[in-house]
Structure formats: C-alpha cells, structure tokens
Amino acid sequence: MCLGITKKSQLHIGCWNINGHKNKGFDKYSDPRFINEICNKDIVCLIETHCSLEESLSLDGFKPVHLIRPKSKGTYKRSGGISVFVKSELRPGVKFLEHENNDYIWLQLCRDFFGMKDDIYLCYVYNPPDNSSYTKSLDEDIFELIEKDISKFSDSGKILIAGDLNARTGSQVLDFINDDQLLDKIPGFENFSPDQNLLVRYSMDEVLTTRGKNLNEICIQSGLRILNGRVQGDFIGQLTCFTPNGSSVVDYFISSESLMENISFFKVHKFFGELSDHCQISVMLKIDCRINNNINDKLQFAPSTYIWNETSSQEFITALSSDNIQSKINDFNNKTYDNVDILVADLNSIITEVADKKSRKHKLKEFRQSVMNELDNLHDNNPNKYWDLLKELSKDNNKSSSPDIPSNTWFEYFKDLNKSKVNTPNDNFVNNFKQMEKEKIFSELDFQINDQEIITAICTLKNKKSSGFDMILNEMLKCSQSFLLNSFKKVFNHILVTGSFPNLWAKGFIVPIFKSGPTHDPSNYRGITIGSSLGKLFAKILNTRCSPG
C-alpha cells in the first residue's frame, strides 16, 4: 500500500434539511447540482431524507451513516431521517456515538487526528415541529435528551450542534449572561468562569417562540453560542427556511463559546427552491491535520455507460420531444448562470434524464440477452461464426485488462509518466513571453460561437466512442442537436466569454491498453484518457478556428 501525507488546515462542516429525497417523483439524489452542493464538504449531514436504507444516498469518497425513521402507522409514509457523510480520509478521526433515537446523532472529532487541543463533539439534530403527531408521541423532548448529552460531553471536549431545530430565537436576544464577570468580586464566586462579552446576535427573523426561548436558555446554561448572525460570513442572521406561510431562521450552528475562536466563518448557502425549502448551512473550522492518503482511495472505477443500439436514436428523440423535457430546456436557456460548473451540470442533467427514459440496467440486460440469443442461433446454424463471435467477445473483454498490476502501481506510473526535468527559462524569455501575451496576435477566438460551427463539429463526431464521467455519448449529441443547439451555444459561449472551464470536462479516466511484452510491466500499456464528449465538441470548434485554411 502506498501512502502520502497531506496537511489540512480547514474542516468544512455542512448541514442541510432537504425536505425529502423525492419531490413529485423527482429524485434529488440523481441531480448533479444537488450532489455538487454537498460533496465539497468534509463532513455533511442531510436531514429529513424520508427514505429507506435501500434508497439512501451513496457518495464517492465518503463514508455514510444513515438513521432511518420507521414508516408512519397512519400514512405508511416515511418522515424524518438523517444521513451523515464523512470523507473517507477523515473517517479514522471520527467516532459515531450512541444516541437515544434517530432524530439526532453525535460524532466525536478526535483531537489527536485533527490537531486540536480538545475533542469536538458534533451533534446533528432534527427537532420536528412541536405540533406534529410524531413530537407528541415522543416519551422525552429532544432538547432535553440533547441537553443531557451536552452536560456529559462538555467535561471531555467542546460542543458543536447543527441542524433544523424548528426554534425561532429572535433578534438581539442574548444567549449569554451580560457582564457576569463582575461576579468574581463576590465571595464564593472566585472560581466562576464568566461569559465573554460577545457581539450581539442579529437575525432577519425577529420572532421569538417558546422553543426559541428554551434554546436560548440552553445556550446560557451550557456555555453555547448561536453562530447565526454573529460571526464572519453572516452578521445579519440570514433566513434559512422559505415556505408559503413565510420565511424564518430555524437552521442553526451552535458552538461552545471557547470553540468560536477556531471558527473561520459561518455561511447560509444559496436557496434552491426546487431542491428544498431550507438553505444549506456550513461552518469552516480551523484544524491542523496530517492525513495519510491511501493511493487506492484516489482511484475510481469508470462510470457506467449507456448502451446504444439501432432503436436508441428514435427513443432518444421521442424523449427529447416530451413536454416535460422541452420545458426544462426552455428553463435552462432562459436562466442566468454565474457558475460554469452548475451551468454544465444542469445541461448534463437534462441529457442524462432523457437517456434514463430507458435505464442503463435495462439496456445492458437487453444487450446481454441479444448477445446470448445471437450465440444460441449461431451455435446451431453457423458454428464458424459462433466461435468467431466468442473469440471477438473474449478479445474485447481482455484488451484493457491488467490483472497482474496493482492499482497503486498504475497510479504511480501514470502520475510520473510525464515528469521530466525542465530547464528554468531565463528572465528575458519570460519577460518577452509575458509581453506577447498582452499583444493581440490573432482574433480567431474573439467572437462568439455560432449555430453553423456547432452543427459542422457535431457532424464530424464518430459513433461508438466511450463516454466520460458525464456519461454523454456522441450519439446523444447528434440526436439532440436540433433540440439543444441553443443550449450548446449558451454553454460554449459562456466558457469563451468568462474563461472559466468546467471541472467535469477537465476530468478523465485512464484506460490502459496492452501493447506487447510482459503483462506485469505498466510500460507495456498505452494509456487512453477518456474525457467528456461535450468538452471535446467545444475543443473541436476552437481547434477548427485556429487551424489554417
């Protein structure tokens, strides 16, 4: 096993009430934008998942823990539910602790692993509305259960609480005792530890409910402080929940007062109404962590792909013509984007949704069945072709396999493949090159991409080529050009104008193709990098512009 050391100075911790993983049949777990919003955290919790264990989300590079609430006896539907995801390389430093029910969970962030003075006890919690039948059925109030744990864990470390507490704590309401440092002048209070005089906490939600009063009182008694409306990133107490009945602040991060100096910022993320009626919230925690990276964790299997056969073109076009897809295309074309990764993710989502009208598993099953049927027919009617087909299938199956070479060897080989000692250029060359960059040498890339350029480039795409991480095939681009031409043009020109290249297009997976010689030697393989077909289409247009003639 090959290890490397990475230094990590910040820990990004997030929490999001997603209000169910499905909405009117739409599965949020399949939305690239949803995944993008959570996978850039180190530790993240999804609240109100409303799913079974089988339906729970799986994220590449994360170790999950799922808390599932049983179906309601009355409606036979699921409510509540918590899923916690910890990055794989951080999992050795995180312990999941016992809890009374499935509405909250405690994590212990070990001080030795994260390079902190004390352990941090992180609690993710969903406190259902106080008027819900579920809340009324509980034997003990969730706040009371958590308060007991706070008292227990405070003796061993610092506390960090995150979640939807369904408590409105008002604005400029103190969650600490003001000027209690004067008590140390009174006999009997010599060892008293006074509260710090903190910034007054502001909130755009000025309502103070009974639960909010209870939460403020817990903070005062336990030495905890609400971060919303108080620390860098949110000094106004931004709203976190938006419903037809109004907007409110009910999602919180709360920390031990002594932990606040280690918190770089607190953030209320952008509201995505189609994904949830709550905003995601997160904090950045200062740490001093040294991570042993297992190279195998950096390796990924190639994503699954779509099987394209003679009926796929018509099926794809039919799905593109549906009212639902046409509506999504119009929404995409009319929407303004600042982030190129979200722009590309939304377009990918439309294309893959069309492709999913006939699932990959179903297509793969059909493909395998057709091969089996062909073999059966040839076995009886044409034995020679039967053995030729078997030989061809065997060749396809083995042409990129390399059973004698471990994955970490591949990683090191391809990582070092292009390493070479480069002479440092002299200062005159560097200065001249910088000056040339400022001069306008050619203008081929200074005007926007038009329809004809895209159509011409699409016509040159070859069929039966592998798809990249976005799973989009050249055949899909060909079939969709009359439907998505404006969408392609929007994406390409956004990249051209902003100079921002999508991260997804910059990723590729390497397939080693055996050439000759001993199979255990990586140098006897030729690496083929499979990238995004849509990204290649964009590059093809630019290349045509820059080519002479």
Image (cartoon, rainbow, N blue to C red):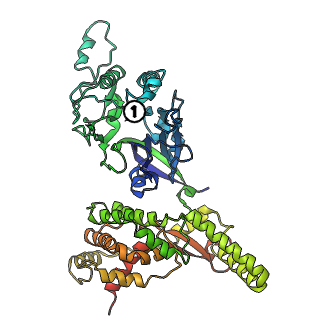
Residue at screen point 70% across, 74% down? 373
- Residue at the (58%, 64%) spot, across then down: 362
Q: Is residue 271 visible?
A: yes
- Name the image quarter holding the N terminus: bottom right
Image quarter (top left, top right, bottom left or bottom right) of the C terminus = bottom left
x then y, percent, for residue 458: 40, 81
Tag 1: amino acid: Leu
- Measured along the vertical axis of the image, is residue 295 above or below residue 313? above
| Horizontal arrangement in the rendering, residue 368 relative to residue 52 (left or right) | right
Local secondary structure at mark 1: strand
| Residue at the extreme bottom | 549
- The residue that disc 1 covers is 160
Q: Is residue 290 above or below residue 211?
A: below
Tell me which corner region of the image, top left, top right, bottom left or bottom right, holds residue 282.
top left
In the rendering, at what x and y percent does residue 467 appear?
Answer: 50, 71
Image coordinates of residue 199 in percent, x first then y, are 22, 31
Q: Position of residue 531 (x, y in %)?
A: 47, 71
Of the pair 266 and 393, the residue shown nearer to us: 393
Residue found 25% across the figure and 17% down from its top: 180
